[in-house]
Amino acid sequence: MLFSFPGICVKDTGTPRGRGVFALRAFQPGEVVEACPVVVLALAFDALPDQLKKLVFDWGVLAGVPGTLAVAHGYGSMYNHNNPANMRYEAVPSEALLRFVAVRPIDAGEELTINYNAYGGVPEWNEDENWFERMNEKPIVEP
């Protein structure tokens, strides 16, 4: 275990995904899994270094603040992608937070995931794999 937070931890997935965030206990639908403070950046996405592009959230869409991105503290920028994911995320602009919320029952030991392609933090997205195309990568999705 690399580091942990009450109820969640980071460890190697044993897959090409590398490390991931895992539940140490069960979570119920609607339960907040993690609330992460964010650093809001007033920068264009294309101006970011490539490594940072893989960590930011579109704060403009999430919080209604056009032209901004956010880097989440905690494990927020470490969740792997899945479609559908087992969590959604939402902005709390007044507190500069991102909340990650379970959308279905999550078992202890299960990897916690978000959907990188979904606008507005929803768990399922059936349009093009936009995020992966922008990053020039292919999604690694576990069954």
Image (cartoon, grey):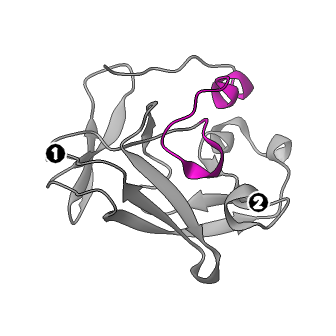
- Vertical position of residue 84 compared to residue 78: above or below: above
Q: Which residues are magenta?
A: 117-135
User: Which of pointers 1 and 2 lies earlier in the amino acid sequence?
Assistant: 2
Label 2: which secondary element:
helix
Q: Please tell me which residue is depicted at 22% across the width and 50% down the height of the picture.
A: 23
Q: Residue furthest bottom?
A: 94
- Vertical position of residue 63 compared to residue 22: above or below: below
Q: Is residue 118 left or right of residue 108?
A: right
- Vertical position of residue 14 compared to residue 72: above or below: above
User: To which residue does mark 2 refer?
Assistant: 60
Picture quadrant of residue 82: top left
Q: Please tell me which residue is depicted at 50% across the width and 56% down the height of the picture.
A: 89
Q: Position of residue 26 (x, y in %)?
A: 15, 54
Q: Please tell me which residue is depicted at 85% across the width and 45% down the height of the picture.
A: 47
Q: Please tell me which residue is depicted at 39% across the width and 59% down the height of the picture.
A: 101
User: To which residue does mark 1 refer?
Assistant: 107
Residue 130 highlighted magenta (yes or no): yes
Dot 1 alpha-carbon crowd within 10 angstroms: few under 14, some 14 to 19, many 20 or more: some
Dot 2 alpha-carbon crowd within 10 angstroms: few under 14, some 14 to 19, many 20 or more: some
**Amino acid marked by disc 1:** Asp
Picture quadrant of residue 64: bottom right
Q: Is residue 111 left or right of residue 50?
A: left
